[in-house]
Amino acid sequence: MLNEYIKTHTKAIIQYFVIDLQGIVLDTDDALFPKVKNENLESLHPFFESLTPLFSLPEQEYLFSCIHLNINDKALITDITLRTFKDKPSLLVIQDLTTHYNNYQLTAQIRNESVINSQILELRNNYLKEKEDFKNTFIANFSHEIREPLSGIRTFTEILGKTNLSPEQKDYVNIIGSTSNHLTHIIEDILDISKIEVGKLNLIEESFSLNTFIEDLIFAYNVQAQQKQIELTYSLDARLPEIIIGDQYRLKQILSNLLDNALKYTTKGSVSLKLSLNQFRAKKASIHFEIVDTGIGIKEEDLNKVFTSFEQLDTGLLKKGTGLGLAIVKNLVDLMHGNISIESEPNKGTTLSLNISFKVDDNIKKRVKKIEAEEETRSDKKYNILLVEHSEMTQLSVLKILAGHGNFYLDIVSDPEDVIPTIENQNVDLVLMDINLPGITGDVLTQQIRQMPEREHKRVPVIAITGKVFAEDLKRYKKAKINDVIKKPFDEKSLLKTLYKYLK
Amino acid sequence: MKTSKKIVLLGHFGVGKSSLIRRFVENTFSDYYKVTIGVHIFKKDIELPEDKSVSLIIWDLEGNDDINNTRPSYLIGTSGFIYVFDLTRPATYEKLQHDLNYIKENYPNIPLKVVGNKLDLVTKDFIKQNSDTFKPFVDYYTSAKTGDKVEDLFSTLAKDLI
């Protein structure tokens, strides 16, 4: 029975050929490719044509794996062995491994496609990264170039506003001031969104008084609201902590954007800001911010667009700004691990709700009082400030601001080589350092200051005054032991605040 | 008298070796990528000047990212090599010099043509920008898709073999 089954069910997978020196098939068992006896192998498939020169080399064995043969319309994937002998015809063995190799083909197809796709993806990513780097470098350079003259415009507008002007001239100065402020905001928006998109925006945590922060914020918008005859109100939950820790600059940016929009799109009625405490847990206060306006509202189909970059809804009002404001707000709230939502009804108004958690430190109160006391005691003291700056406009801006206060003597150095001798020969209390100096950068120059032999010289506070404030720039300044950075364009308040922070 | 010459195409997988052969032998092209395993063998007779003709036995080897892994039995009796890389994938030409040295050292005096394929997918500027990488080695920039320089490649190699 077994022999009968073997005879009936065995599937031949090997064919043997006896061949002469010319490649003529002298004998074969017809197992795979029948009716080839007396044929020349060369005529059956071009593979054998390459084999012919080998028939005359005696006592050799060659193995050819995975050869695709198509003979008399029968296609097989085979392993082929050729054995040559001395004074005897050669033996050719063809083994059919089609099923085995087809399985392998499938695996190879998946593997190769995956490798190729990942290589292409990597190339695309590199291409996008190069594009992104180019964009960021461009934005950084562009913003630096703009900050410099803008800084001059803002400072001198402030100074000009304090001189004796006619009411008409005052109006013009106010317009220049608000226009340059607007331009500054646009530049900040573009910079911020580009930083956020590449994950380079870092939050700076500091403690601040929530009450004062909100009062200042509302105060800044009161005039605008009064001009439009809109009621602007705010309320704070009595349970809210007085001092919180967070990035107040970014929080102000969030709330300012929302208040700006609320006032812009409200022509009558009111805008209100309400703060309440969600919960207090693990020294963290979760605060709920709600901005409600009675403005034109947003159509339901447009609600999902409001947080998208460069989207401005067709409101029928004059379009203003970059359309980045709410995209920045959304990204900043995300960065603070908070959430934001919007509800709106056309012609009725809009409600924006935010939930953000802030750390709370009760000891902060005492420290704030101590700092305030220090500020009071230093009001009579005079400080020697060394300004290292090649831009005449910035030199004049700093000079005008500091001259307006009685507390400073200002030395200006525009040649970097004069910096070290000046520090050695004069009692410099603080250095204001430009970064883009001729022939050297401010951070390298600071490193040289930090290596000066005298302790009082090498430890002098150095504050960079620059438009280059990308994360990688800030890292470089920190590495050079620069104490702080004043960002161009700066105003009187920010310059003085930073100076006093480092002056004892 | 007609002579037969074995030509072997080498290079990484997915560079278009099979497509170049299909374009040359059948004058067809498909965007579908089917991985070659083992070896496919094709034959094409071509006429050369001075009434000469040659049968090219073209071995289309499976692609390999390491030339050292090429099965030696496939290369027995080879008269000419065509080394193909993909202009759009640096991984296929990063070791170009090494691979070419391998061929020249192990198979000296055998004609070799080096081909940057998929010319239709890159710009002239790209070729210019990468001329330091390509120029010292490359004999032909081809496109199996458009047929650009494919015929030239095989017929020039055939002439070199006679």
Image: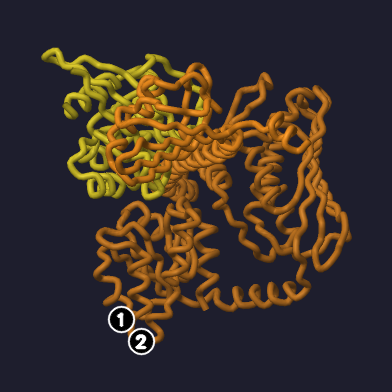
Structure colour scheme = by chain
Q: Position of residue A480 (x, y in %)?
A: 41, 70
Residue at image coords 47%, 67%: A478
Which chain hosts label 1? A
**Of residues A8 and A361, the one drawn nearer to the viewer in this rendering:** A8
| A310 sits to left or right of B40 | right
Q: Position of residue B53 (x, y in %)?
A: 20, 17
User: Cβ–Cβ below 8 Å for labels 1 and 2?
Assistant: yes
Q: Position of residue B100 (x, y in %)?
A: 27, 44
* Rendering colour (chain B): yellow
**Of residues A186 and A91, the one drawn nearer to the viewer in this rendering:** A91
- Does dot 1 land on a helix, a strand or a loop? helix
The C terminus of chain B, quarter of image: top left
Amino acid type shown at disc 1: Glu
**Of residues A71 and A5, the one drawn nearer to the viewer in this rendering:** A5
Q: Which residue is mark 1?
A: A424
Q: Which residue is mark 2?
A: A454
**Mark 1 or mark 2, which has the lower sequence index?**
1
Amino acid type shown at disc 2: Glu
- Say few, some or many: other residues with alpha carbon within 10 Å of mark 1 (under 14 / 14 to 19 / 20 or more): some
**Of residues B144 and A370, the one drawn nearer to the viewer in this rendering:** B144
> CA–CA distance between discs 1 and 2?
8 Å
